[in-house]
Image (spheres, coloured by chain):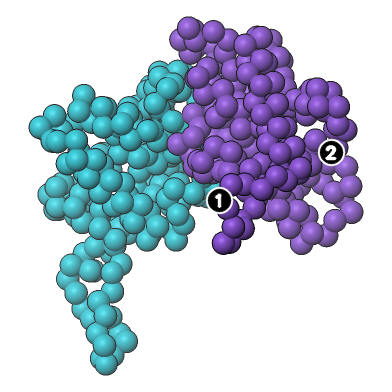
Chain colours: A purple, B cyan
């Protein structure tokens, strides 16, 4: 069986960069935005549309008090479900194909049969704000308050999405094998140490 | 300045064993029950008495409705405060003496000026139950329910103690640099990876 590493991460914590470093060190494939591109290609929708749709809670059944309990036909809803299903299929295909690092997308849950090494990457808020200013386009123009609000909103979106899809709490350490704070330890050193752990794991058969 | 590693740990997660392994690998001193022994020696009290006293919340001021707001003289209270003060002094002395690993005792908070590497060790409940049965005296005789209750009670005591002494939440990942789940990764491999991280940290001056 392939070895899979999944990364959940707070916004601005450097989880994506850590994932890339880890994939490089281990010679693994790295999947992040590639998954959205693949969904877009297969569904014949634009990447930005897909990105927006799969960041919503996918199965929000409308409530119709006093009406039938049958869910009403809702084109947005069925498209959201369809895209989530497509995402699951793509994750499973990628997981079968080769050893890989996958960022986000509830991959820890969807690919749980592969017994992935599940990482959660986080950092102090001020550290994340600084990283956003240093690395994310357009963040330099935001005020302290605007940036803080933006970071908290993205975290909330990730948390809601994860919890809705998996039924588990995004921030619960028990869903992860390692939770790493990038405020003090460099991404390079963290990647090196995690790569060592991965190499030591019994082969995933 | 010396390098200090502090370990907070869920009961039965193997945090103590991980700390010992880490200290061995790094050639650091290891302090755990030695701190209680030292407090007992300096206070001329028995180790079991000290252990019991310092596991209580140390500053529980008695409430006297309608009386003076001045705390009443309470021999148990002042002894508890005294022992906590002694514990802080001993931690600071140990922290000054040499590089070390310290288990529990809110050392991450008391020695924060040393900028310690702060670890939190946890595991799935069933894994902790198994570890307790395998390693802790007398645990083999407990029923599943009794053992679960015991584990939860010790965790609650540690959490209350930490939160009372530090004002921070024991289980908040932001109080730690690395949170490691011992359910899947062996203690030996975790210690090796963490030792690598420690060696890579800039010298603590």
Q: Secondary structure at mark 2?
A: helix
Q: Nearer the viewer, residue A28 or A56?
A: A56
Q: Can residue A76 be seen by looking at this rendering?
A: yes
Q: Position of residue A27 (x, y in %)?
A: 69, 10
Q: Nearer the viewer, residue B101 or A151?
A: A151
- Quadrant for the N terminus of chain A, please: top right
The answer to whether A63 appears left or right of A131 in the picture is left
Q: Nearer the viewer, residue B128 or B101?
A: B128
The answer to whether B178 appears left or right of A146 in the picture is left
- Residue wearing tag 2: A49
The residue sitting at 28% across, 74% down in the picture is B61
Q: Which mark is residue B131?
A: none
- Residue wearing tag 1: A69
Residue furthest out toward the bottom: B66
The residue sitting at 44% across, 61% down in the picture is B167
Q: Secondary structure at mark 1?
A: loop
The residue sitting at 86% across, 27% down in the picture is A44
Q: Is residue B69 above or below residue A104?
A: below
Q: Position of residue B4 (x, y in %)?
A: 47, 37
Q: Can residue A11 be seen by looking at this rendering?
A: no
């Amino acid at each position: 069986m392939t070895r899979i590493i999944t990364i959940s991460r707070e916004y601005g914590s450097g989880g994506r960069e850590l994932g890339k470093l880890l994939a490089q060190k281990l010679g693994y494939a790295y999947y992040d935005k590639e998954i959205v591109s693949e969904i877009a290609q297969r569904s014949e929708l634009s990447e930005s549309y897909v990105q927006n749709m799969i960041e919503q809670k996918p199965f929000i059944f409308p409530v119709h008090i006093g009406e039938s309990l049958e869910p009403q036909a809702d084109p947005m809803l069925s498209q959201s479900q369809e895209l989530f299903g497509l995402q699951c299929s793509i994750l499973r295909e990628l997981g079968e194909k080769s050893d890989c690092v996958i960022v986000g997308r509830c991959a820890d849950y969807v690919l749980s049969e592969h017994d992935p090494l599940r990482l959660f990457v986080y950092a102090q808020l001020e550290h994340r704000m600084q990283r956003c200013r240093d690395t994310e386009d357009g963040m330099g123009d935001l005020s302290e308050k605007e940036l803080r609000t933006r970071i908290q909103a993205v975290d909330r979106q990730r948390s809601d999405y994860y919890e809705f899809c998996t039924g588990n709490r995004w921030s619960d350490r028990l869903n992860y094998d390692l939770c790493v704070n990038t405020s003090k330890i460099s991404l390079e050193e963290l990647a090196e140490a995690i790569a060592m752990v991965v190499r030591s794991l019994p082969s995933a058969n």
